[in-house]
Image: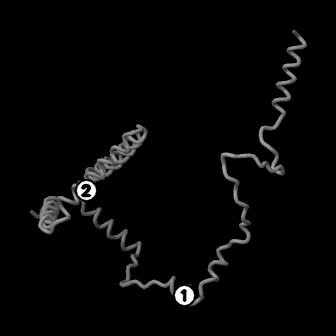
Amino acid sequence: MATAASSSSSMVATAVLVPRFPAASVRTTGCSALPPLPPRVSTASLSFSSSVKLIPESKRFSLLQTKASEETSVDAGDLFADLKEKWDKVEDKTTVVLYGGGALVAVWLSSILIGAINSVPLLPKIMELVGVGYTGWFIYRYLLFKSSRKELATDIEALKNKITGTE
């Protein structure tokens, strides 16, 4: 019994020591489920500068040139001065701060809710399907025909007037 146990333990040891994969230098001609890998290409032969040199210099610089239609630079001092002026005009600053904080909390909670919905296996695909369906309906209802586009424009203008209080 003791000899059987020692022989079985030596067989286990030899089974562990035998490599499961053939050595890299040995080529097998047997059938494999995976196709052979293509030879490695040296990354030193490929470089960005060699591909840029293929484009003539005049075309290279013409591709990089852009023209601005008008001056769009904004001075940071002017921006902060405008923000300070608008903040000074606000009468109830605590309400603005509370609304801003509430908006941040709402964005945080909605990201948690979306993460929870994403973890349910089929729900993200169903929500995507609902979104595609609603987008199709919106396009058909408001954007496809000229009369419905005018109706949408008047609805948007009415909403803007309602929000700004110029109604």
- In-front residue for pair 159/18: 18
Residue at the spot 25% in from the left edge and 50% down from the top edge: 95
Furthest residue in direction bottom, as rendered? 58
The front one of 112 and 59 is 59
Q: Quadrant of residue 82?
A: bottom left
Say what secondary structure mark 1 lies in: helix
Quadrant location, the C terminus: bottom left
| Residue type at numbered disc 1 | Lys
Mark 2 closeness class: few <14, some 14–19, many ≥20 residues within 10 Å: few
Q: Name the residue tied to disc 2.
A: 136
Q: Residue at x 36, y 84 (%)?
A: 70
In the displayed structure, 64 sits above or below 30; it is below
46 or 81: nearer the eye?
A: 46
Foreground: 39 or 65?
39
Q: CA distance from mark 2 to mark 1?
A: 43 Å
Q: Amino acid at mark 2?
A: Gly
Q: Earlier in the sequence, mark 2 or mark 1?
A: 1
Left or right of 130 on screen, residue 152: left
Q: Residue at x 83, y 49 (%)?
A: 26
The residue where tag 1 is placed is 59
Q: x%, y% of residue 166?
A: 11, 64
Where's the N terminus, which quadrant? top right
Q: Is residue 5 above or below residue 61?
A: above
- Residue at the image position 70 percent from the left and 54 percent from the top: 36
Mark 2 or mark 1: which is in front? 2
- Say left or right for 119 vs 10: left
Q: Residue 114: horizontal and vertical position, in percent?
A: 38, 44
- Considering every residue shown, the one lying at the far top of the view is 1
Q: Cβ–Cβ below 8 Å for labels 2 and 1? A: no
